[in-house]
């Protein structure tokens, strides 16, 4: 493989990884196991930086794009950790003899006619 071919392959891999991370983030935004605060914290912070009048590199969007990509990466990472903790909590409650999921509310009810 030539030097140019290796460079093209690494660029393609980086683009595919970034695209995969964007799709994963889109899926995680609608996942109920991800806390709402996490769904709002990083995206809102990235958008605030995007529109903030003070900039590290005025006139060039490189730092803005970098901040958005970093926020996207951290959101995916933290959301996956939250899902792992939620899954571990559900598995732990099921292992302790409780067959109900963590989000189940146990109550009594009666029908009034």
Image (cartoon, helix red, strand yellow):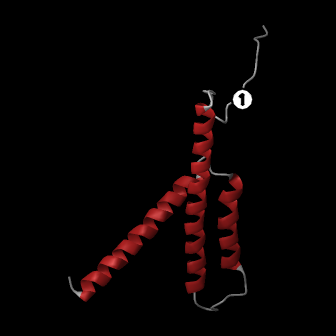
Quadrant the N terminus occupies? bottom left
Q: Is residue 82 above or below residue 20?
A: above
39 displayed left or right of 72: right
Quadrant the C terminus occupies? top right
- Identified at 26% across, 88% down, the residue is 3
Q: Is residue 112 above or below residue 106?
A: above
Which residue does the numbered mark 1 point to in the structure image?
105
Q: Quadrant of residue 7?
A: bottom left
Q: Is residue 60 above or below residue 78?
A: below
Residue 30 or 96: which is nearer the viewer?
96
| Residue 49 rendering spot, x and y as whole percentages | 69, 77
Task: Work out which residue is located at the far front of the displayed protein and give it.
Answer: 96
Q: Residues within 10 Å of mark 1 (few under 14, many from 20)?
A: few
- Identified at 60% across, 77% down, the residue is 67
- Identified at 56% across, 54% down, the residue is 28
19 displayed left or right of 112: left
Task: Work out which residue is located at the far right of the displayed protein and give it.
Answer: 112
Secondary structure at numbered mark 1: loop
Q: Is residue 30 above or below residue 20?
A: above
- Identified at 61% across, 60% down, the residue is 78
Q: How many marks?
A: 1
| Residue 103 rendering spot, x and y as whole percentages | 67, 35
Task: Work out which residue is located at the far top of the displayed protein and give it.
Answer: 113
Task: Work out which residue is located at the far left of the displayed protein and give it.
Answer: 1
| Residue 79 rendering spot, x and y as whole percentages | 59, 56
| Residue 4 rendering spot, x and y as whole percentages | 26, 87
């Amino acid at each position: 493989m030539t030097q140019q071919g290796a460079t093209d392959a690494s660029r393609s891999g980086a683009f595919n990884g970034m695209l995969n991370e964007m799709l994963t983030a889109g899926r995680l935004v609608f996942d109920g196991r991800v806390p709402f605060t996490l769904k709002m914290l990083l995206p809102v912070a990235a958008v605030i930086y995007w529109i903030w009048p003070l900039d590290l590199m005025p006139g060039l969007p490189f730092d803005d794009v970098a901040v958005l990509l970093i926020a996207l990466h951290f959101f995916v990472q933290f959301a996956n950790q939250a899902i792992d903790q939620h899954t571990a909590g559900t598995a732990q409650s099921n292992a302790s003899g409780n067959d109900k999921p963590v989000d189940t509310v146990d109550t009594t009810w009666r029908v009034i006619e």
